[in-house]
Amino acid sequence: MDGVLVHESNALPGAAEFIAALQENGLRFLVLTNNSIYTPRDLRARLRAGGIEVPEEAIWTSALATAQFLSEQTPHGSAFVIGEAGLTTALHDAGFVLTESDPDYVVLGETRTYSFAAITRAIRLLERGAKFIATNPDATGPSPEGSLPATGSVAALITRATGLEPYYVGKPNPLMMRSALNRLQAHSETTIMIGDRMDTDVIAGIEAGMRTILVLSGSTSREKVGTFPYRPTMVKDSIAEIVPMVKELTEANAEG
């Protein structure tokens, strides 16, 4: 989502046209984000403000993937959560009880107001045997003023204090890609991952068996692509360059 369809609150060139082309040609899609702060309804409103129409059910976040994973691991379990509405709502909807008293898990997500008291509580619960889960490993997030510490940075602090590494559910874990494929009822061989980061989007797509397109409208410059030991299937300047490909992909899928 960020760096591909939008930058901050502004739609990137070609984003609305790309989503419209997918819908007009009957191609199934999901908009993915590692950001666990917002619910799909919040994100739909954010996209709509930029002129991009995406239904709620076509938005898949690391919070939703985390909630689904935990509900499969420990149905009707309990968790102490550091995060915002996107994460707490997803866990509630998955049947989890949110508690500070002997939870099964400590679940760390992203928030703009990390609390020292909450981090301390998380450390003590982990020391008592709770299992450590984090929505994504991103160390920083963007803001108009510059970078902000994100989930990965706070997870590193907790790891340093406890010696416990979290299990990250979001990108680059291919688990998030596979859950998205299942949601789409799609096969990796007929699915393309489009993203702006080599270290999360592209590697996750590759490990899930998908073709990948890197767009240079976000976090990765063309010069940096060659520093990674893996390559995307294609590199494009922006999502606008992929709009003409949608019809070609539709015809290719129809031909098998």
Image (cartoon, grey):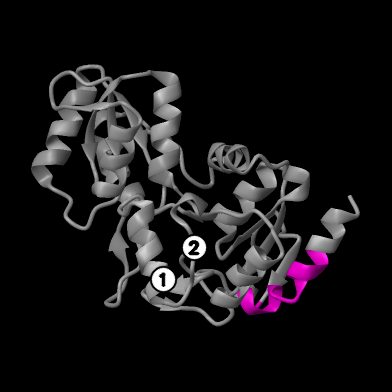
Counting from the top left corner in percent of width and height, residue 15 is at 55, 75
Q: Which numbered disc covers residue 48?
A: 1
Give me the residue at 69% from left, 42% from top: 186
Q: Secondary structure at mark 2?
A: loop
**In this image, 207 relative to 161: left or right?**
right
Q: Would residue 118 be visible to someone looking at this image?
A: yes
Neighbour class for label 2 at 10 Å: few (<14), some, many (≥20)?
many
Compare residues 20 and 214 and report the one nearer the observer. Answer: 20
Given the current orientation, which residue lies at the most extreme bottom position? 13
Q: Are marks 2 and 1 in contact (CB under 8 Å)?
A: yes
Counting from the top left corner in percent of width and height, residue 155 is at 31, 42
* Residue that mark 2 sits on: 54
Q: Which residues are magenta?
A: 237-249
> Label 1 sits on what residue type?
Arg
CA–CA distance in space, label 2 to label 1: 7 Å
Counting from the top left corner in percent of width and height, residue 14 is at 59, 79
> Label 2 sits on what residue type?
Val
Q: Secondary structure at mark 1?
A: helix
Counting from the top left corner in percent of width and height, residue 160 is at 28, 37
